[in-house]
Image (cartoon, rainbow, N blue to C red):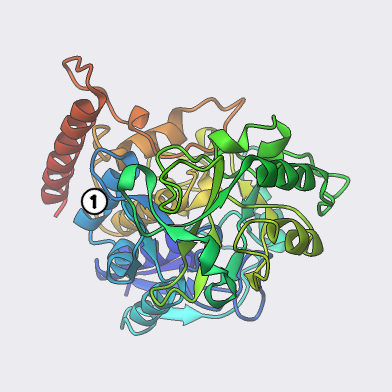
């Protein structure tokens, strides 16, 4: 029987394995956890979420929402598991991390065509069809060995995760549920007056951070900046970013607060809360000191402290084909954030496409994805972006081929782009059945 190795059981690897198995391809799915953990992972489960429990917006006039709908059309195991393990988060698809990861792990482990191998992969065989989905935290040993198959050096940037606090440790007398403009009522809000904000700001920008290693430059990704880095850009920067009060009304005053910290449920029971936008590189003792200055968090119990880690990605435009395989070694495919597709849903999408393409190598190669779809646009970006200054790209409608007619109204334009995308993807899927 035909067989493919998938290295890494994160979001991309799990999705790639599923797409292969559903096409009748035997899969050996390698995962080094729990024998060895990365700096950001804490469980042995597949598809563990490490930065946020949110997979982004759900509406079709939102690029991330459209991408998730495209993945549903492709029968994504990860997105469908997310749908079944959703927790309230307004117009965002947030999940109970544990039940979500447990479901993906169970379904893949029990699939008759998937063999789970719990060991670290250090080297690979370029003659065997293999998908490298080792993630942005690829182990140093594998990363070093991969270099001999690549035409260019690895790139990297620093990413960060926000802390999680216990729900029962919060002072609910100082907090309230509300969302911007009376929407998304599932967020817990900690309002700050001007004096409270100023004290918090001063403490934040002067707090001690974990030092970078001497050989590492501080290259941060704009979509997941540490909160202390945002604060350094100006005293009011936080009030126009993660602490933006606009549209949030404190029911006790009937007015917008001066600033507001939002907390999002980590699980359906509401036992844990994530500090939205509070990814950080502060030392743990400083997180205890500074974040407990937030009203309602004076006695907060930290279930997980914020962390920062170096994300590794390859120069995809220089080395990858439109099928996410290496130009020089066409049996080696890459998927996930290691390709430079930024964010959870992009990782799932590249995993799906790598799985479909790798299955095609053993049977019949699929037609290229339509550039009118978000998935197709993302793959096109990974192939055609600047080789000299390649940077990770978040999901946005700019990736999609424009409409033939100009439409000024953005919501209407996005709606039409979404309709065209879903129609074209279904047509593509039927032609490749």
Determine crowd level at label 1: few under 14, some 14-19, many 20+ residues with C-alpha closer than 10 A: many
Q: Quadrant of residue 236?
A: top right
Image check: 135 left or right of 91? right
Image check: 130 left or right of 123? left
Q: Quadrant of residue 16?
A: bottom left
Image check: 304 left or right of 206? left
Q: Residue 194's spot in the image, x, y percent?
A: 64, 40
Asked if residue 9 shows in the view, the reply is yes
State the residue lying farthest toward the right. Answer: 214
- According to the picture, the residue beneath numbered tag 1 turns out to be 69
Q: Residue at x 12, y 41 (%)?
A: 423
Asked if residue 157 shows in the view, the reply is no
Secondary-structure class at tag 1: helix
Q: Residue 84's spot in the image, x, y percent?
A: 28, 71
Whether residue 388 is situated above or below residue 318 in the rendered picture: above
Q: Residue at x 23, y 51 (%)?
A: 69
The image shows a total of numbered marks equal to 1
Whether residue 310 is situated above or below residue 201 in the rendered picture: below
Whether residue 182 is situated above or below residue 391 in the rendered picture: below
Image check: 427 left or right of 153? left
| Observer-nearest of 25 and 53 | 53
Q: Residue at x 31, y 51 (%)?
A: 91
Q: Residue 107's spot in the image, x, y percent?
A: 33, 79
| Observer-nearest of 142 and 137 | 137
In which quadrant will I find the C terminus?
bottom left
């Amino acid at each position: 029987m035909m067989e493919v190795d998938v290295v890494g059981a994160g979001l991309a690897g799990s999705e790639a394995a599923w797409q292969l198995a559903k096409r009748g391809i035997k899969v050996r799915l390698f995962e080094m956890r729990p024998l060895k953990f990365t700096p950001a992972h804490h469980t042995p489960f597949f598809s563990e979420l490490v930065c946020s429990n949110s997979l982004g917006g759900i509406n079709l006039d939102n690029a991330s929402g459209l991408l998730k709908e495209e993945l549903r059309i492709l029968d994504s195991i990860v997105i469908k598991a997310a749908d079944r393990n959703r927790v309230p988060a307004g117009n965002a698809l947030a999940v109970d991390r544990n039940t979500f990861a447990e479901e993906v792990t169970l379904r893949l482990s029990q699939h008759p065509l998937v063999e789970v191998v719990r060991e670290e992969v250090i080297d690979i065989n370029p003659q065997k069809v293999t998908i490298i989905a080792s993630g942005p935290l690829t182990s140093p040993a594998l990363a070093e060995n991969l270099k001999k198959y690549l035409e260019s050096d690895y790139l990297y940037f620093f990413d960060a995760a926000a802390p999680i606090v216990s729900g029962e440790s919060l002072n609910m007398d100082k907090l309230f549920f509300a969302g911007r403009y009376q929407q998304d009522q599932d967020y817990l809000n900690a309002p700050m007056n001007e004096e409270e904000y100023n004290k918090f700001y001063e403490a934040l920008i002067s707090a001690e951070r974990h030092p970078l290693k001497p050989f590492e430059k501080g290259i941060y990704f704009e979509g997941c900046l540490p909160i202390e880095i945002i604060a350094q850009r100006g005293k009011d920067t936080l009030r126009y970013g993660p602490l933006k009060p606009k549209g949030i009304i404190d029911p006790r005053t009937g007015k917008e607060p001066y600033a507001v910290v939002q907390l999002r449920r980590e699980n359906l029971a509401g036992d844990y809360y994530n500090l939205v936008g509070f990814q950080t590189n502060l030392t743990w003792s400083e997180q205890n000191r500074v974040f407990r200055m937030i009203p309602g968090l004076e006695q907060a119990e930290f279930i997980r402290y914020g962390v920062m880690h170096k994300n590794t990605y390859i120069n995809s435009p220089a080395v990858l084909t439109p099928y996410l395989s290496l130009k020089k070694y066409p049996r080696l495919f890459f998927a996930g954030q290691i390709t430079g597709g930024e964010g959870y849903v992009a990782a799932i999408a590249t995993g799906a496409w790598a799985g479909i393409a790798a299955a095609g190598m053993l049977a019949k190669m699929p037609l290229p994805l339509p550039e009118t779809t978000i998935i197709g646009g993302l793959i096109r970006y990974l192939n055609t972006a600047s080789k000299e200054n390649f940077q990770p790209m978040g999901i946005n409608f700019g990736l999609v081929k424009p409409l033939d007619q100009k439409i000024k109204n953005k919501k209407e334009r996005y709606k039409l782009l979404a309709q065209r995308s879903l129609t074209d993807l279904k047509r593509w899927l039927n032609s490749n059945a």
